[in-house]
Amino acid sequence: MSGNGLIPGIRRLINTDERLRTSPFNQLRQQMSDVLGDGGILKEVVQAGDGPPVPHNASVLMHYSAYLDYSNVPFETNTHQRFPSIMKLGRNVTLAGLEMGLLTMKKGEFSRFLFEPQYAYGDLGCPPLIPAFAEILYEVHILDFLDSGQVDDFIELSPDEQNTAPLSNLLEIVNTVRSFGNRSFKQSHYENAKNHYKMAVTLLGNRETQSDAEREKVNTALLPLYLNLSFTELRLDRPHKALKYGNKALEINSDSTKALFRCGQAYMELQEYQSAKECLISAQAKRPFDSDINNLLKKVATCYKDSLDKEKNLCSKMFRHMREK
């Protein structure tokens, strides 16, 4: 009977069945919960997060790795990136199961998801990396998320609708946009950061304030944006624009140490050392032990002295040349 291949075939079936029962994915399945109730998306929380879950249309900052069964090497991962790109649900996150899974997660959470083919790459897979009818495991760590859907909805409103919206809503939107800018700045994407800061400034500038109290709240929100813009323009080697935004910050709060420091930095880059010195001395008077202020003030003094020495030498050479004639 062994000659017709029946016994080896039965053995192969038994081995395959045993292999399926002991596969890594099947072992994981025993400790996972059913997200939708149909067995298509299973989840295991490895490390709990804090706060509310990720909202619809949010933009998510996450580390992730995706695996096939029996594989210890991910076919897709971004864990090597210190600053992963922000991914918007519905736009950058296109895998149905992953998007649904992310909506169950909180900031700081690390979870594993097991997706059946209908919530992953379907019947066809994605050759050559992903075979047909493949189950997929995702390990996801939510670093942060921003409610960009709320921002999108607000920007789509007409100017009149934006003006009649509660000021608290506008300030929340502005804070979210500023957070996008801060994320971009930390990743050294300075042009992108600048664009977000300017968007936030525009939203605040379009607001028709109804009282002194509202104007005060708007100015309080504008101050850090102008400071951020000033710092960003310095990183972009645009000291003239950095000075402009630093002065706008001083118009709101003439005692702002950060604004004085930013103006001092800008004047320093513009080689206007006397103006830089004046700004930094004013900042130093408010924070005498601030090392950044004191170090820059020393640098300005040195550069100012060097520039005067060069000017004296130049004048001396000119007069000597005139005398020789």
Image (cartoon, grey):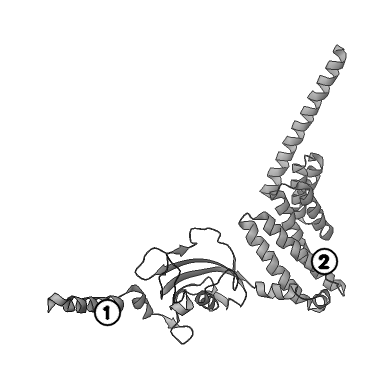
Kindly indicate the quadrant of the structure image that contains residue 136: bottom left
Q: Position of residue 15 (x, y in %)?
A: 23, 76
Where, quadrant-wise, is the C terminus in this rendering? top right
Of residues 60 and 212, the one drawn nearer to the viewer in this rendering:
60
The answer to whether 222 appears left or right of 23 in the picture is right
Figure label count: 2
Q: Which mark is residue 307?
A: none
Q: Position of residue 157 (x, y in %)?
A: 77, 76
Of residues 150 and 299, the one drawn nearer to the viewer in this rendering:
150
Question: Visible in this render: residue 202?
Answer: yes
The answer to whether 104 appears left or right of 23 in the picture is right
Q: Position of residue 91 (x, y in %)?
A: 60, 70
Question: Residue at the location (62% across, 73% down)?
Answer: 58
Question: Residue at the location (72% across, 60% down)?
Answer: 195
First in sequence, mark 1 or 2: give its number.
Answer: 1
Kindly indicate the quadrant of the structure image that contains residue 224: bottom right
Element marked by disc 1: helix
Question: Residue at the location (70% across, 45% down)?
Answer: 294
Question: Residue at the location (62% across, 75% down)?
Answer: 57
Reading the image, the residue beneath label 2 is 205
Type of residue at label 2? Gly
Reading the image, the residue beneath label 1 is 17
